[in-house]
């Protein structure tokens, strides 16, 4: 059977994570499992998109998990050998066709293009691709 | 000041939305504001990633909002003229540098590579780029 090639779109980096987490072995699997505070550092040309973000805000940060394996379609959740293999779309594994990370964080401090946030499990150098508010968040006050 | 160009990564389409919503004028802004049921139709080569998904599951669907304007950095939330302009990162506007849609849905029916889901505000033909479980969802049972 002939497979039509998947359409490809271009994602750009709007910023980068600065974190004490340097490798996957030291990173917790989720932000609420002991992840450190980290800095989100945005590129100057996207600064206007941050207008209105302040200390205390809850944000959803979308990252590009650039150390993930994009060929993986099935995995054991949480790398637990006792658990059955499942499709990656039923998990939060970073390994998946498009390794987009989704992180819920709180803003602890803002310094211009830099936001210090709580509990981010992304590694140092991870590209940031989008930021949103949770539904019920600051855009809906 | 010289701007270093943003790094570009390639996102592939893993499936497509089939919906009765054909244009932005008829689409609600959020899924819980009267959005219809829709079908998520996955490409055969990503079928293994769906293993374990069944009726009743809650999923986070990530889409590529291909009709959005990627040049917009500031907007009025919910297009409400009474509200002040804010950075797009403080909103859920589809217009943003990387227009990734984030939708929480429930699986109503599964038919192989096709999932019928509730309350999806994405338009017909919107590319699907990822599927995850909410934290506390089926991967963590």
Image (cartoon, coloured by chain):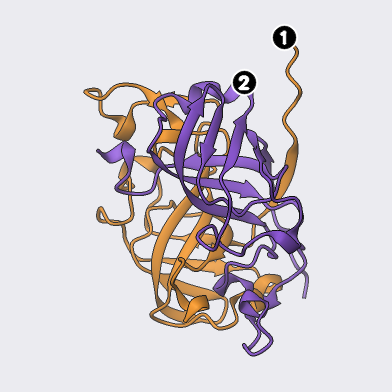
Chain colours: A orange, B purple
Measure how far apart labels 1 and 2 are at the Cα level: 10 Å
Q: In the image, B84: left or right of A63?
A: right
Occupied quadrant, residue B55: top left
Residue holding disc 2: B44
Q: In the image, B79: left or right of A109?
A: right
Given the image, what chain letter belongs to the residue carrying mark 1? A
Q: Residue at horizontal 73%, vertical 47%?
A: A10
Q: In the image, B88: left or right of B55?
A: right
Viewer-nearest residue: B9 or B24: B24
Q: Position of residue B36 (x, y in %)?
A: 58, 50
Occupied quadrant, residue B95: bottom right
Query: Which numbered tag is attached to residue A1?
Result: 1
Q: Residue at horizontal 51%, vertical 31%?
A: A69
Q: Position of residue A115 (x, y in %)?
A: 48, 74
Q: Position of residue A84 (x, y in %)?
A: 29, 21
Query: Quarter holding the C terminus of chain B?
Result: top left
Query: Quarter holding the N terminus of chain B?
Result: bottom right
Kindly tell me whether residue A27 is visible in this rendering. Answer: yes
Viewer-nearest residue: A118 or B36: B36
Circle 1 — which element? loop
Is label 1 in contact with label 2 (beta carbons under 8 Å)? yes
């Amino acid at each position: 059977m002939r497979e039509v090639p998947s359409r490809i779109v271009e994602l750009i980096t709007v910023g980068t994570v600065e974190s004490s987490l340097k490798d996957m072995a030291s990173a917790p699997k989720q932000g609420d499992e002991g992840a450190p505070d980290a800095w989100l550092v945005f590129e100057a040309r996207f600064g206007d998109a941050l207008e209105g973000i302040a200390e205390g805000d809850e944000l959803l940060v979308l990252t590009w998990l650039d150390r993930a394996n994009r060929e993986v379609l099935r995995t054991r959740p949480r790398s637990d050998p006792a658990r059955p293999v499942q499709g990656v779309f039923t998990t939060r594994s970073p390994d998946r066709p498009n390794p987009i990370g989704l992180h819920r964080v709180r803003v602890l401090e803002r310094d211009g293009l830099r936001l210090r946030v709580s509990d981010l499990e992304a590694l140092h150098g991870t590209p940031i691709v989008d930021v949103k508010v949770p539904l019920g968040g600051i855009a809906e006050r």
